[in-house]
Image (cartoon, helix red, strand yellow):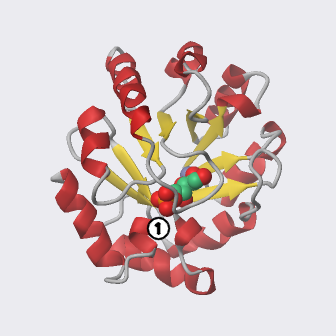
Amino acid sequence: MSQVLIAPSILSADFASLGQQVREAEVAGADWIHVDVMDGHFVPQISFGEPIVRALRPVTTLPLDVHLMIEPVDPHLEAFAAAGADSITVHVEATPNPDQTLRTIRDLGVRPGLTLRPRTPAWALWPYLDLADIVLVMTVEPGRGGQSFMPEMLPRIEQVAHRMDECDRDRWLQVDGGLNASTTGSAVRAGAQVIVAGSAIFGDSRGVAAAISGLRGDVGG
Ligand code: DX5
Ligand code: ZN
């Protein structure tokens, strides 16, 4: 896989015109739509739930990439799958049995993803890597958009990239948090294949299309 994928996070979109913003991102060449679900418990903030996935499903043909920052996570997987999620990424900290959770997601016909907080050691992922189609390295503390990229996560991206290379299946190393024109290049050089960006895309005063092509320019895609 050579081309880097761009996944705009709707967390920073204008919720009053969400459908339009997602269409704009699709026309501008976005690859996935990243949907951040927060419960006010696993992270302090509450964003939205599965009705937003259901509402967006007919709006776009792009994969809906759902990032669940919720605990417990298992009771909600079926609802997000039924709503139209194409991938569901869970936090290793949010489930007592990550292997079971990832298998359940796959059994629901959805691509399973696994992620971790920056302060959780990377080795927490290793036993489950083969069960995940997406491995997400968080480059900010989950919970809010608009935070600064943590450069100390670059070695972690390299480490995960190295481990994922050992497997020949189609999988993606995704990064999320603080990705913008100045930070995307280093994340990609470290091995990132999917760039999640919220404020850098929906908060760009030049508009969504210019922001996405700006990021593409940065990643040479
Ligand atoms: C943070 C979310 C991110 C967030 C990224 O908890 O997982 O997806 O929307 O926002 P930016 O790109 O603004 O850092
Ligand atoms: Zn996210």
- Depth check: give the residue in front, 204 or 150: 150
Helix, strand or loop at label 1? It is: helix
The quadrant in which the C terminus is found is bottom left
The mark tally for this picture is 1
Residue at 17% over, 61% down: 217
Q: Residues within 10 Å of mark 1 (few under 14, many from 20)?
A: many
Left or right of 206 in this view: 172: right
Q: In the rendered view, tell whether residue 17 sits above or below residue 106.
A: below
Q: Which residue position holds label 1?
A: 199
Residue at 69% over, 24% down: 98
Residue at 48% over, 36% down: 137
Q: Position of residue 90 (x, y in %)?
A: 65, 38
- On the question of residue 64 being in view, the answer is no
Q: Position of residue 147 (x, y in %)?
A: 52, 57
Q: In the rendered view, tell whether residue 151 sits above or below residue 145.
A: above
Left or right of 146 in this view: 153: left
- Depth check: give the residue in front, 9 or 75: 9
The quadrant in which the N terminus is found is top left
Name the image quarter holding residue 61: bottom left
Q: In the rendered view, tell whether residue 186 sits above or below residue 200.
A: above
- On the question of residue 161 being in view, the answer is yes
Q: Position of residue 142 (x, y in %)?
A: 62, 47
Q: In the rendered view, tell whether residue 38 sits above or below residue 172.
A: below
Q: Position of residue 24 (x, y in %)?
A: 40, 79
- Depth check: give the residue in front, 124 or 146: 146
Left or right of 198 in this view: 103: right
Left or right of 172 in this view: 177: right
User: What amino acid does circle 1 point to?
Assistant: Ser
Tell me: is circle 1 under 8 Å from ligand 1: yes
